[in-house]
Amino acid sequence: MRPWRAYKSLEWFLFTGFAMAGFVALVAIMVLALKIPGQRMFIGLVSTPTVTPSLAPSPLDTTGWQIYRNLKYNVEFQYPNEYILKQVSDGYILIRPPDATEYDWLLSIQIEPPVGFATVNPSFSEAADAVKLFCAADGPGGSKYCDDILLKTPFKNRYNIDGYEMYLNEIQEVGGEIIEKRRRGPVFVLNISPNVPQRMFTIEFTETEKQTPLNEMILRKILDTVKISQ
């Protein structure tokens, strides 16, 4: 055999040998991995888990804020020390600044499920959609209701409680005719009872016009302090 042919044969032999050795090693690693308890092998792209963002931070300091506790629903939150809080019922609360008139409430909080919500064991997402029922109101001058959810963004507060920031389509009717459509929100909803999803903490402005930068910071800070009582 000529020298160059011997060299080529040796080169091919080494290449083939290394390739086979690499294949055998790969198979051995796969078998070993499958035998390790709790381990799984995945072939393909690794998906990135969805991370729910935290509630947008508010620069307000809650030092000295009052603490409200609801013993019936085992939930509590903080609110500015000088603000006025009124518990209308077990699950309905109003808050206003000290310089506002007696009935000029700033924030409305609902802990009870809305009237007419009868779904059995819904998911939190389904239960949150029921905030549309809070819009319903009838009076001598007409009626209003919400027929759709325009935007629904998930978040978590500082105590890792799941929530949604929502905007609704509100309709006002007079004599059966639609006279106005407007966007209602933000409406914030927290799931304060993981085992009973329809128990929600809902907070929003009593009027859209009250949504100033300072008032929104206060609302968000109150929302961030909501936690389930032990």
Image (tube, grey):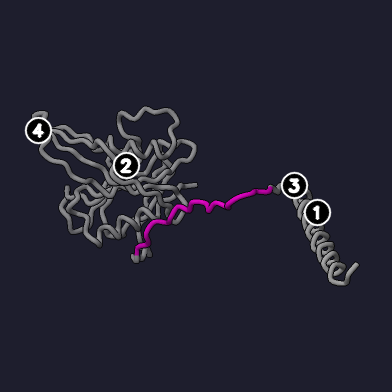
Judging by the rendered image, the residue that carries numbered circle 4 is 174
Q: Which structural element holds mark 1?
A: helix
Judge left or right: residue 30 versus residue 177.
right
The numbered mark, 2 or 1, whose residue comes first in the sequence reads 1
The residue carrying mark 3 is 34
Q: How many numbered discs, if any?
A: 4
Asked if disc 3 and disc 2 are in contact, CB closer than 8 Å, the reply is no
Q: Is residue 148 visible?
A: yes
Residue positioned 87% across, 68% down in the render: 6
Mark closer to the observer (3, 4): 3
Q: State the image coordinates of residue 55 (x, y, percent, origin top left).
A: 39, 56
Residue corresponding to mark 1: 24
Q: Position of residue 105 (x, y in %)?
A: 21, 49
Q: Which residues are magenta?
A: 41-58
Residue 110: give its label: 2
Residue 63, quarter of the rendered image:
bottom left
- Asked if residue 79 lies left or right of residue 18, the reply is left
Type of residue at label 1?
Val
Q: Residue 224's image quarter?
A: bottom left
Q: Nearer the viewer, mark 3 or mark 1?
A: 1
Which amino acid type is marked by label 4?
A: Val
Q: CA distance from mark 2 to mark 1?
A: 65 Å
**Disc 2 or 4, which lies upstream in sequence?**
2
- Nearest-to-viewer mark from 3 and 2: 3
